[in-house]
Image (cartoon, rainbow, N blue to C red):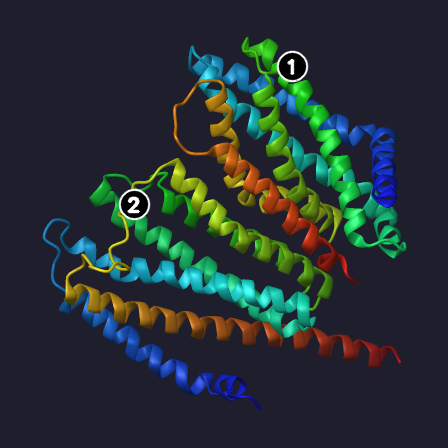
């Protein structure tokens, strides 16, 4: 547990020192929401039905972008190899990275929710919506962290990560958009989307935790 | 030598003639023998290639999944060759299922594409297979680390398939409900027989193509190994 904490603190400290990567992800997310609100405001008078889609595509792009960028420096400097050589299990390293990515993304997402509340004039910081956002983020961050640490080189990682991650995240995206829409009272539906979101989060975390040590074994 | 290995040795003797006979029977059955569908007309004959292609896609994904587990477990690059072979064939048949489905959808549903459950899940699977191939081909065929990474991706992707299907099924569905795998089949007997022959023929073709691709990938790996050995000797 203390080892997980050590990796977490190290990653957060690195993220803080190397703010450029995360700030780019946050700025990218903020600009996406702005661009969406301009573009959709021209197309339709009622933007509300589009809001869940806008939020979740932005979250996903920011998440994929950030988990690749956060890992870039570490791979270049050889820190990652050194971490794997240290006398802790790779699972511990993975959990630390997962938590640091989760914390950084949740910060970005809350900033976005506040921005969207102002821009779209819709109260988004409700307990239900916050729970859905946390559950969905837990679902995708483990997969993007796993895939972000894979890949053969920095250049291929930057290009391939979205291509690899986004198809895997389709179920999570559908469930998250529908669940968000349900809490905003946008679409009526019977399907248990929150449950699917929970199943996806559990599945992706378990799969990533089991497969990460096998993938990085040298 | 185990029975499986002995059988694998015979692949070039057994598979080509069996596949050839199967494909011929499929063509005769689908074009000539099967009755003309009353409502849809001749376009319905696409079924004899469309449904088997979908089965072939799932067979290829199953081989990819199993071979990827073996890559992680046995650390043998021969399994990586099999995984790459299966992924390529999977892309081929999922593309084929999507294309024939579109051609069939236009006259019957009135559109080439619908965000229907099975169409969407096939498309997502197609994208996952392409992503796997891209991830694997950016590095050398004999790069073990890359083989392990790609194997992890293939396993995650295969395990994702049930979740994808569940999510898109709850989302919406337009596709005909299953007509074959039921206790009281709704498909007329003669059509069912032709469909069965076509499925067997296409699955044989799938196995043959996967074996062919696997051997090609294997030769590529050995070629790289030989080149490296030659380089070492020249340096010495």
> How busy is the neighbourhood of tag 1: few (under 14 within 10 Å), some, or many (20 plus)?
some
Q: Find disc 2 in the rendering and name its residue.
A: B175
Instruction: Name the spot of residue B92 as percent of width and height, x first.
Output: 44, 60
- Determine crowd level at label 2: few under 14, some 14-19, many 20+ residues with C-alpha closer than 10 A: some
Quadrant that contains the N terminus of chain B: bottom right
Q: Is residue B173 above or below residue A109?
A: below
Compared to residue B142, the image places residue A64 above or below, namely above
Q: Is residue A71 visible?
A: no
Q: Nearer the viewer, residue B48 or B134?
A: B48
Residue at image coords 19%, 70%: B29
Q: Nearer the viewer, residue B148 or B223?
A: B148
Instruction: Determine whether, in the image, residue A14 is placed left or right of residue B47.
Output: right
Identify the residue at image location x=29%, y=76%.
B22
* Residue on which disc 1 sits: A114
* In this picture, residue B185 sits left or right of residue A141: left
Location of residue B86 in the rendering, given as x and y in whole percent from the top left corner: 51, 66
C-alpha distance separating marks 1 and 2: 41 Å
């Amino acid at each position: 547990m203390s080892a997980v904490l050590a990796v977490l603190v190290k990653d957060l400290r690195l993220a803080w020192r190397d703010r450029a990567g995360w700030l780019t992800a946050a700025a990218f997310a903020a600009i996406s929401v702005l661009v969406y609100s301009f573009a959709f405001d021209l197309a339709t008078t009622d933007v509300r039905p589009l809001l869940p889609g806008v939020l979740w595509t932005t979250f996903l792009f920011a998440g994929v972008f950030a988990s690749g960028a956060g890992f870039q420096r570490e791979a270049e400097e050889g820190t990652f190899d050194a971490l794997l050589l240290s006398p802790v299990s790779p699972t511990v390293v993975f959990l630390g990275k997962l938590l640091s990515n989760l914390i950084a993304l949740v910060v970005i997402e809350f900033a976005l929710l506040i921005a969207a509340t102002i821009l779209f004039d819709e109260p988004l910081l409700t307990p239900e919506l916050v729970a859905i956002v946390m559950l969905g983020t837990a679902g995708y961050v483990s997969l993007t962290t796993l895939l972000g640490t894979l890949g053969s080189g920095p250049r291929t990682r930057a290009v391939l990560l979205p291509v690899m991650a986004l198809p895997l995240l389709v179920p999570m995206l559908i469930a998250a958009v529908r669940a968000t829409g349900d809490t905003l009272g946008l679409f009526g539906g019977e399907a248990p989307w929150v449950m699917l979101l929970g199943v996806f989060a559990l599945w992706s975390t378990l799969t990533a935790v089991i497969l990460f040590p096998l993938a990085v074994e040298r | 030598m185990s029975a499986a290995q002995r059988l694998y040795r015979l692949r070039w003797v057994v598979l080509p003639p069996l596949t050839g006979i199967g494909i011929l029977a499929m063509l005769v059955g689908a074009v000539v023998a099967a009755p003309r569908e009353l409502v849809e007309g001749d376009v319905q004959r696409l079924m004899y290639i469309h449904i088997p292609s979908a089965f072939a896609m799932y067979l290829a994904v199953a081989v990819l999944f199993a071979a990827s587990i073996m890559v992680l477990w046995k650390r043998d690059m021969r399994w990586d060759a099999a995984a790459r072979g299966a992924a390529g064939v999977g892309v081929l048949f999922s593309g084929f299922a999507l294309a024939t489905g579109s051609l069939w959808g236009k006259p019957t549903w009135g559109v080439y594409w619908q965000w229907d459950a099975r169409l969407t899940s096939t498309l997502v699977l197609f994208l996952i297979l392409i992503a796997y191939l891209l991830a694997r081909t950016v590095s050398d065929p004999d790069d073990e680390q890359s083989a392990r990474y790609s194997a992890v991706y293939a396993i995650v992707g295969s395990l994702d398939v049930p979740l994808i299907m569940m999510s898109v099924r709850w989302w919406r569905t337009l596709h005909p409900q299953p007509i074959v795998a039921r206790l009281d089949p709704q498909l007329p007997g003669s059509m069912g027989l032709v469909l069965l022959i076509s499925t067997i023929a296409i699955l044989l073709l799938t196995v043959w193509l996967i074996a062919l691709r696997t051997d090609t990938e294997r030769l590529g790996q050995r070629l790289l190994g030989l080149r490296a050995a030659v380089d070492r000797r020249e340096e010495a």
